[in-house]
Image (cartoon, rainbow, N blue to C red):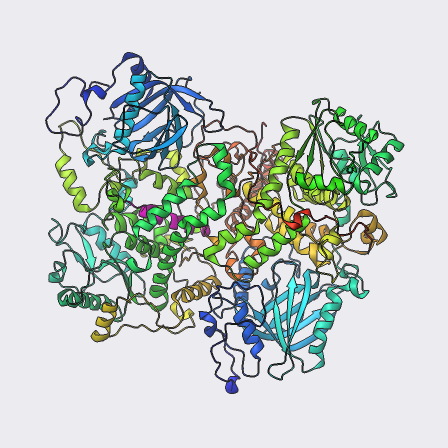
Amino acid sequence: MLSLGSGGPKPAKPSFVSYVTPGEINSEKDSSKKVEHLDLLPGEVVFCSATPVLRYTQDDLSQRGVFGTLLCTNFRVSFISDESPQEEVAQHFKNRLYGENDIPLSCVDQIYGVYDEKKKLITGGQVKNKYPSKIIFHCRDLRVFQFCLTYAKEEDGRRIFQGVVRHCLEPKSLKCVFAFSYSVPAKPVLQENQRTVMFESLEDWHQEMRRTKGDCKPIRDNEAFEISHRLPKYFIVPAAVETEDLSKCEGKGIPIWCWSHHSGCALFKMASVPLGQEDTMSQSHMERMLHAVAQNYLYSVKTEDLTETLPTLQDIQQSYNKFKQFFLIDNTMDFWLSDVKWFSSLENSGWLDMIRQCLRKAMEVVECLEKENTNVLIMEEGGSDLCCVVSSLVQIMLDPYFRTMVGFQSLVQKEWVSGCHQFLDRSNHLHQKEKECQSPVFLLFLECVWQLVQQHSPAFQFSETYLTVLSDSIHVPIFSTFLFNSAHHKASVLQAESPRSQNEVLTCPPVWDWSVQFDCKAQDFFINPLYAEKNKPDKTQRKTHKPKHQRQLSLPSSAFKTPPKKGFFKEETESLKKMLRMRRVSRWLVSPDSPQASTREFYESWQRKPLDYHGVLLPCLDGPAMRVWMQRYLRWIPELQIFGGGAIAVTNRLAELQGEVVQLRRELDRQGRRENKPDNHRPLALSRSSVRLSSSFPFASNRNWSFKPVIPNSRLHSIDVTDNLANQEDEATEAFTVV
Amino acid sequence: MEKQSSGSDSPVLPAIPNRKPRTLGVNPGSRQESVDSLDSPTGSHVEWCKQLIAATISSQISGVVPPEAAARECKVGKKLDFRVSRRPNLRVFRDVQKQMQTDEVPLVPGESVRTTAKDVMYICPFTGAVTGTLTVTDYKLYFVSVERDPPFVLDVNLGAISRLETISVQSHGENTQGVEIVCKDMRSPRFAYKMEDQSKQEIVGMLTKYAFPLSNDLPLFAYQYKEEYPVDGWKVYDPVAEYKRQGLPNESWTISKINSNYEVCDTYPALLVIPTSIQEDELKRVASFRAKHRIPVLSWIHPETQATIVRCSQPLVGPSDRRCKEDERYLQTIMDANAQSHKLTIFDARQSTVAETNKAKDGGYENENFYSNVELNFLEIPNIHVMRESLRKMKEVVYPTIDEMRWHSAIDATHWLEYIRLLLAGAVRIADKLESSKSSVVVHCSDGWDRTAQLTSLAMLMLDSHYRTLRGFQVLLEKEWISFGHKFASRVGHGDENHANSERSPLFVQFIDCVWQMMRQFPSAFEFNELFLITILDHLYSCLFGTFLYNSEKERVEKEVYSKTVSLWSYINSQLEDFSNPFYVDYENHVLYPLASLRHLELWVSYYVRWNPRMRPQMPVHQNLKELLFLRAELQKRVEELQREVSSSHSLSSSSEHTSSPSHGGTPLHTTV
């Protein structure tokens, strides 16, 4: 197991193997025994380890913990407890790649060292000889680990500290990411996989266009990335775009088709072209493009520059940094101190407001498509961040197909992966120093989706657990989905890396291959048991003729009393030019009403219609409606586990009921009557009674929570006890008379 | 947007002045831009209205109609037709289901119309002004407008009215009057009308008379309500049966009739559970040492450990730390009744500073030096005045409009959820003392009828799953709140016009909120649903039922509440289906500890913000489940039918094994705790 690189000569050029100096690899016997406990993944190598290390249990301040071995491999930081492995508590939700005591390297968010009781943030590069007595990991999936290094040999302690810091915090090359060492025998492509449309072939795009009955032009001229490295091999543009337009602005300024509304209008996105005053060339190009978009349907177009109206990537990053701190809690004391300030700090972080802004923008676009039937073109500097957020949200709101699991996955492929979202740079897996490019844009999108799921749960086939797992998977450095900045980037890296040796195949599965992480049973948690599947009235007859996805018009545009509003774009090149120059295109409505009020009205008129889970879906954006994604953020905090409560209690009850229904149906069948209603519900195989589960289920399920109630240990400082009222008598007067 | 067709003479309105005529609790920063989109009331209708509109409405309005949404909900309700009974008129969202008759006012039996006025304008803060007919009965105010389709209906129980404010507007020389109806249930509808005929001149008079009957020498409406229900809610609570359920009396505790004429304590019920060994004269001396003679009595006993929850009022130690040997012995007896522990824990709900100042006023708290083995804890919960102020602030935050940008800090500033947190944390400590330390607890505040009732009933809800059932919860309320003299009449101010009375305080609302928070954290542990809680709160104010009237059992007996009024539980228990939680699973002996962390507490939007149409759920979340339950019931029926067929055609063979299949909601999940 440890043979790799231990004796071989150091190659001249650093490669994914030799990045580790031989000395780092610990081959001492005693610790290798421990290592045996660790199930290494194919291609995983242990760099260093230290023993005994004390892992503090988070539950209290008493500094109690478990002794064990701390290891660092090329995939993860892992802690192996000395205590005999607990007899397998039936684990419903075990990740095959890493356990609860493992932190994938790219999941490490921050490392703190405690030197003489002082907590210091460790940054790469500053590793001195002095190593801290205690090391604290803050993970991107919001777990917190605390290890005490003082019990290990000094040499071991230093080595593990340096190793961890180097591999978790310092810049590295993409080739060092575990995905390129991870090799498993090629598996037959899974069926699941096939169903998710990857948008890597022209046919996928054709199919999507047929599905939405769009009428645009597929482009294959970028097969070898001649047009642009920032565009996928295949994409679709408005029919009126000429081939020569494509290569004008280095791939920018091309309206890319996202989705067509059943009315014929469509949503396009575009990497905007910087417009200088004198730059007539690009101005005329923009004009042509706008015309092309407008021609798609009824000669109408509305444009929106997201760079101007939504927060910047830095804003998003900063806001999230503040927000996540409320959940990365070192001890009970900190927890209760921060609890008092909870609502105010929540607001100060601005994170919920970011989510609201994205949802609102998407709603504005939905309004244009659904109510006014105009084409919409959203723009942004790179065209691959907020454009992806907004366009995907719009499609989820309008198209029920994207609310199924496969549909959602296809959407991410279409808008994010093919859309060349810079996953690698945004997540900063490689710890590049220029931090400006780091920003949790994809997470922001998932947050928005979660809000929709929360508000309209029966409309979604997937559960919040699915979203939580997906958000965790961003930081598991195995999946091709999240490792690259663009299709071109992926192609070039894979080409350079691919045939490393004959017997190893580079497996870089998409995250959608869920079997890599979870077994079938665990995957059941991805399904929302409350999903209101579409009833197909007489499925046997019509099934074959209908397109796979039937969209239902719950909101015929005639239902709106307000006339199609203003801003109807016409062949007025002058005004267009002016608009472009002023860059004030973002006004959807020329009326004095703010777009907000209009969206509000749009929402309210939608709200009055009967809710159709397979029609248009809009989120409520009022203060109380925007919530914190409890499952994702609170699941690891021991103080916040509700025993016998939480959403799982309901899920459990539902599963139970579905089981009964299934059983009764069988009973009916057995008794010789045919029941032709299809069984829509997939029963969850949950046997434990909800009474014994905690609200963070299925996460953190094998932790030993104490069943003692959590009692706040700090007084509420913010309550103003000196208030006059507080000293007032309960009784107004002593005499109390019966009226 | 609705049109008003007659507006030929309507002057072009100048930009609506941003100034409001008077402060109406409007966020100063509220946006005004959409006021233009509001249909301006035609011509003649006053500046006052416009100003009111401008003041009331921030960016929210857009000239849309909520009752449509309501009507839709109704349709949804119909689709879900398997709720058994459908008694009209008592829905929570009253404006929900009206769409049938337009000029006829639905009346409950015993209700009569007092005045009806046409051409009254309701200034809806959400959807703009609407003109229609206003009816005042002796029970409710009912406004209907056919301007909108379906008709717009607003319905307010007079009992919910806290105060009436009239503004006469003379600026236009027209005799126009505005009325603001400030309600206890978090809304303040506003009307405007011209005082042209008699019916309109009567409106305010009638409203005042029937909203505050006690101030006008009239009986409460509950005495006129004549509905007959198939079940009698007054039979829900039988103290002897309830104590028997708890295993009482036993050798240490007895059910005493010493207070049967309310002579020992006039705010306690007739039956009390006290230690067996206490003599009557001792008891009297204890009574004189406790505020309002509210002696320590048993509320709940742990079925296994015999640890008890005992409630009382503060001891009258006074500034000189007076002692009372009998009181000390009494507490010792309570401790001794529980063999599992040699400690007794007293939870004083008050802030320690306040308890200290109470000493100067002849009250105080137990001195740990005088009571052996007693541990005293202060739970630091502020008093009723603080709570009243907190809820008042909250109304400003949620009604009529919400500033979404500052929602969380605004909620924070009310401290409402912090107080909820304190209460829950206190109750968890009490429950934990009993459950984990197996020791008995004594709970008191000053008088032992506000915070004490909140804490004991919450702790009992955590400890005893019986109280989490529909019937059990009714018993809990009847026992801990109603019979033990929570001063409902004073705290709510039934029928009393003195809205500024400092005795008023939403302590019961706060308790129900705590229950709701528990329900949210344990969505399957309660047999009842949110509608049940909201219904209880609506009838806390409505004066339709006798349940929450008066301050004590003694008064209720005197006023013949039990014979002359209907119990709320008669109504509830006649249609239990509507109030039951489809997710319910019996947690049996499992103790529920809710998390008293603000991260897990949330504002009860569907109660406090329910008048805002945007916050209404479009479809009940459990709809799918209800369908599933329905489906299951159907299948069940068919299976049974088939079985009957089979067994009748063949022989009397095997029918018993199937009948035991899951027919009763919630196959019991066993717990081992």
Q: Quick one: B488 or B175, which is closer to the camera? A: B175
Q: Specify the segment rendered in magenta.
A: A438-456
> Which image quadrant: the N terminus of chain A?
top left
The answer to whether residue B511 is left or right of residue A689 is right
Q: How many marks?
A: 0
Residue A171 falls in which quadrant of the image? top left
Q: Quick one: A405 or A172, which is closer to the camera? A: A172
User: Is residue A451 covered in magenta?
Assistant: yes
Q: Position of residue B462 (x, y in %)?
A: 63, 36
Q: Position of residue A448 (x, y in %)?
A: 38, 50
Q: Position of residue A688 (x, y in %)?
A: 50, 31
Residue A632 falls in which quadrant of the image? top left
Q: Position of residue A58 (x, y in %)?
A: 45, 29
Q: Is residue A196 above or below residue A23?
A: below
Q: Is residue A354 above or below residue A267?
A: above
For residue A436, say whether it is visible.
yes
> Residue most toward the bottom?
B9
